[in-house]
Amino acid sequence: MYQGYSNFRTSVLNKARDITDVNRAFGYWSAEVGTIYAPSENLSGLKYNSETKKEITEQGLNLTSINPAYMMRMSSKELNIATGMNLRLISDKPINPLNSPDGWEKQGLKAMRAGEKEYSRLEYTNLHNIRFEYMTPLFINGSCLRCHEYAQYKTGDMRGAMSVSFPVAKEHNRQLRFTLLTILAYLLVTALVIRLIVLSSRELKKAWHEKLKNIAELETEMQRREMSEAALIHKTRSSSINEILRMVAHHWRQPLNNIGLLIQTIQVANTRQEEDEASVQAIKIVREMSETIDLFTSAVKAENMVRMDVKEMVFDTLKLLRPEFESVGIEVYILCAMGGDSEEIQMTAEENLFHSCGRGRFFCDDVCGFSHVYVYGEESMFKQILLILLKNSYDCLVEKKHGEDRLITVRFMKKGEYAQIEICDNGAPIDVEVKHRLFEPYFSTKGCGAGKGIGLFTAQNLASNFDGGDLFFDDTNGKCFVFRFLPCGHD
């Protein structure tokens, strides 16, 4: 409603300004001209004009001179008759008494003498009689002084004002009807929106109850899956323990045979020296077997969170599997590419290889900056991930024909802020259609990686326990499983 009234008010105000601007321009032009003649019969008394002159044309027409004020009065009179408006000049000191201000014009003159540039109001009688009244000041210029210098006016003084009023009932009522229709339209739209909100709220309430039901079912399903995953992890750990026990048996078979031979040597020894040498050798083998027990138990026992040397964890895990790899002809290469030149060594049966690292260009304290990178977590969990991945490669490689190369490559890599261990092999490639299912529980192929299908699933779950930990398959640079994590520091 306010906007509608504001538009109406602006419209009639601009109309009033246009009318007064045109007549002001006419008045200043009249003052420049000074005096013109008009037919005497069209003029009323000109008592206020001391310079009135009369002339008779050659055709015998009587003319009377009129001043600029009278010229404006005559033009406004014709305009008033034609349009129904009331346009006139007013002054506090009028020469013509007809130019004296009435009630509202006195208020306008007072306001403009106080500094207002214009004055307007809406005179409302009823819906059929509404008028807009407007006043604007008139200032003296050089041409005006011809008539008004006697009163000691100066250029720039306010002589009076121009007043105009005209009917606006038609425009006002049209705007009022438009405003009422707009309000009615808003009310109808509001009622419709409220109705839609009510209907929608019912649907939303119904959908909300369905969502709550689905959430409850989802929570139940998630709890079931968590229990299932926990059972799978427990099953996989049990399987790993069985696998480690099998490796222990494999590790101890040869030393036990050697101890048996040394006992026989002692029994048939001819000298005390031969007995002592056999005893010393047997003790050495027993100590090595004891160290083997520590090595294997560290891979399965539950531990608190500790800070681990990544290289040491990998080398310890490889030592667990080394006899089994050697028994089937699997060669293991270790490759480090940590931003410098790649360094490569081959894993052999030398006991001191992973500690002295004094072979070729490979040095324990300078494995491309990776030798002393650390990760925070549970040691047995870290080793179990590596055991699963290395055993997966082992299962692939034993399927290769006798005489074919069986290679495993362990790469230490640095990718931005992440460190990663890539375990790759040259076994049969993985089909495209099964790549995205590699980490699904109970999914397995009959060829490469045959088994119950929970090893990779468990390894991926375990990897997520490390900071930034992830496990994924990547065949852009060979067939590799990548264990990625954020290191917790380096030396």
Image (cartoon, rainbow, N blue to C red):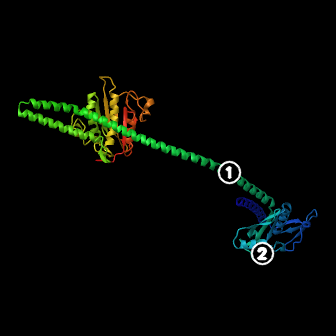
Amino acid type at circle 1 is Arg
Residue 478 position in % (x across, y down): 37, 31
* Quadrant in which residue 388 is drawn: top left
Nearer to me, 119 or 210: 210
Identify the mark at residue 411; answer none if there is no mark. Answer: none
Q: Is residue 261 found left or right of 114 in the rendered image?
A: left
Residue 160 visible in rendering? yes
Amino acid type at circle 2 is Asp
Residue 345 visible in rendering? no
- Name the residue: 87% across, 70% down: 53
In the structure shown, which secondary structural element does the residue marked by tag 1 occupy?
helix
Q: Is residue 35 found left or right of 444 in the rendered image?
A: right
Of the two numbered discs 2 and 1 on the same chain, state the one appearing first in sequence.
2
* Quadrant in which residue 429 is drawn: top left
In the structure shown, which secondary structural element does the residue marked by tag 2 occupy?
loop
- Name the residue: 27% across, 36% down: 320
Check the image and report above or below for 5 versus 444: below
Which quadrant holds the N terminus?
bottom right
Residue 390 position in % (x across, y down): 32, 34
- Name the residue: 21% across, 31% down: 254
- Estimate the spatial distance between the alpha carbons at disc 2 and disc 1, rounded to whole Å: 63 Å
- Considering every residue shown, the one lying at the far top of the view is 402
Q: Residues within 10 Å of mark 1 (few under 14, many from 20)?
A: few
Nearer to me, 246 or 98: 246
The residue to which callout 1 is attached is 195
Residue 77 position in % (x across, y down): 85, 65
Q: Residues within 10 Å of mark 2 (few under 14, many from 20)?
A: some
Tell which tag, 2 or 1, sits nearer the viewer. Answer: 1
Identify the mark at residue 92; answer none if there is no mark. Answer: 2
- Considering every residue shown, the one lying at the far right of the view is 60
* Quadrant in which residue 327 is drawn: top left
Q: Is residue 163 found left or right of 234 in the rendered image?
A: right
